[in-house]
Image (tube, grey):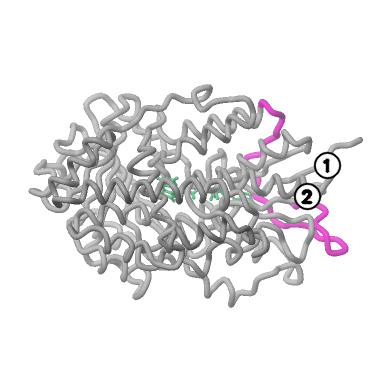
Amino acid sequence: MQKKKVKIIGAGFAGLSAASSLVSKGFDVEVFEKNFKPGGRASQLEDQGYLFDKGPSWYWLPDVYEDFFGKFGKRPEDYYTLQRMDPSYRVYFSQADIVDVPASQRELFELFESIEPGSAAKLKKFLEEAAYKYEVGMKEFVFKPSLSITEFFDMRILKSIFRMGMFQTVHSYIKKRFTDPRLRQILEFPILFLGATPKTTPSLYTLMNHADLTLGTWYPDGGFYSVVKGMETMARDLGVKFHYNSPVEEVLIKNGKANGIKVGGEKLEADVVVGSADYHHVEQHLLPPESRQYSKKYWNSRKMAPSALLFYLGFDKKINNLLHHNLLFDEDFEMHASEIYENPRWPEKPLLYVSATSKTDSNVAPEGHENIVVLIPVAPGMKSGKEVREKYLDIVLDRMEALTGDELRNHLVYKRTYAQEDFIKEYNSFKGNAYGLSNVLTQTAILKPSLVSQKVPNLFYTGQMTTPGPGVPPVIISGQVVANEIKKRFRV
Ligand SMILES: Cc1cc2nc3c(=O)[nH]c(=O)nc-3n(C[C@H](O)[C@H](O)[C@H](O)COP(=O)(O)OP(=O)(O)OC[C@H]3O[C@@H](n4cnc5c(N)ncnc54)[C@H](O)[C@@H]3O)c2cc1C
């Protein structure tokens, strides 16, 4: 029997994950990517001896990657080498107030105790609860396709929903337990990965603290792009065919079903189509209006995760007082959050994330140089001309100089910037978002855009705008969940 043909739109992490999962289930799989290489938002910039990961840099939840490669009889180490960061990261509250978050839990408890007496015991309990949420979250929630509320009608799950405090926010949960504002900020920080604020995120997501403080921060040698290369190599070895520089122009519909895609004016047949590009792009731009399940109004009312203003910088010297991961939390978090979510505008005094992979890896910058990526979370949908970018580069350099006490301006020898317009141009991103939709309660599980089209039965979606949500580990899971759903519905 001829294998069923699946055409996947996009070769980001979700597309790569779906591709391997589907080919191993017996489908004939081809991936079409608009750009010249895989990785999507996790792409890499290589220029003048510098190597910059353009998107993700925090390798968290190593168990998700192990589980993924394990499904194909492989291990991450078959493709890339990992090392655990210790300290995991540095937080600057001011030049004189610096906290390095250690990898060892013994040292972590000591650190908390030294900042707030009595907090070590509270942290121990907090992390036990976070471990429980992680366990339940990973086992009971994330692999569900979230197509119907009945998937969650199980006494164990219902009980856990209450035990996990699903109906209080991360902010209030942490506030009740810790007093020192710095400890609160360290514990709230992982929520920023979900494209939401601690005040709007259900406390289930303190499971992210288990990821941060227990499972740890890891670094794949060569940078995050080594993971992309590993996943693409494995998919090819399993039999997936990749087509780059191949933007999909249309999903072809006949008698209410997807019967192919159009690429470079050519019609290519398909039994199943999977959209792993931004959900909004696939459904609003590649489908005819009658096949769309969501309206413009629906999309415009979604709460988007932030976009990002990014700087890729090369310095011709080693910078003092920076670690591999640095959080510059020396400004007011509430104000920056409100400038992203409540009153979208360019932030006056933004918080910054500074990554320096050259602190760990000698192959990502010329000898004696530093490769720096600076990320400023900003509201989606704004325009960032040259002036805006220059203004923020000035702010970044001022802040970095003040906090590290090192002179930087005269050593800046390479710079590139990246912002909303670039996300739109490069990835067809809706409103220039970086991380998809916010993980607020009203956009969680069955309330997310559906993994399966309700209008076109053989059209599926995967990636950061559908279930389970944004971040590399969740989208790798999303690719597997969509493959399971397709396998259930189509015999091969
Ligand atoms: C700056 C930044 C920092 C981040 N940091 C982290 C981090 O530290 N850790 C972490 O875990 N996550 C992080 N994330 C989130 C993570 O990178 C994303 O959630 C994830 O990579 C999204 O994968 P995806 O496959 O859903 O989407 P994408 O990566 O966007 O992939 C979709 C692909 O579809 C392609 N495409 C679009 N339109 C078409 C078309 N018409 N035809 C063909 N192809 C098309 C795009 O070019 C793209 O390659 C970060 C993201 C950003 C942007």
Q: Is residue 165 magenta?
A: no
- Location of residue 423 in the rendering, given as x and y in whole percent from the top left corner: 47, 55
Q: Which of disc 1 and disc 2 is earlier in sequence?
A: 1
Name the image quarter holding residue 244: top right
Q: Is residue 49 above or below residue 245?
A: above
Residues in magenta? Answer: 237-266
Q: Is residue 256 magenta?
A: yes
- Location of residue 410 in the rendering, given as x and y in whole percent from the top left corner: 14, 41
Name the image quarter holding residue 323: top left
Left or right: where does residue 214 sit relative to residue 404?
right
Q: Nearer the viewer, residue 269 or 353?
A: 353
Q: CA distance from mark 2 to mark 1?
A: 8 Å
Q: Which residue is mark 2?
A: 272
Labelled disc at residue 330: none
- Location of residue 295 in the rendering, given as x and y in whole percent from the top left corner: 64, 74
**Dot 1: element:** loop
Question: Which amino acid type corresponds to the residue marked 1 in the rendered image?
Answer: Lys
Q: Which residue is mark 1?
A: 4
Question: Which amino acid type corresponds to the residue marked 2 in the rendered image?
Answer: Val
Q: Is residue 435 above or below residue 102?
A: below
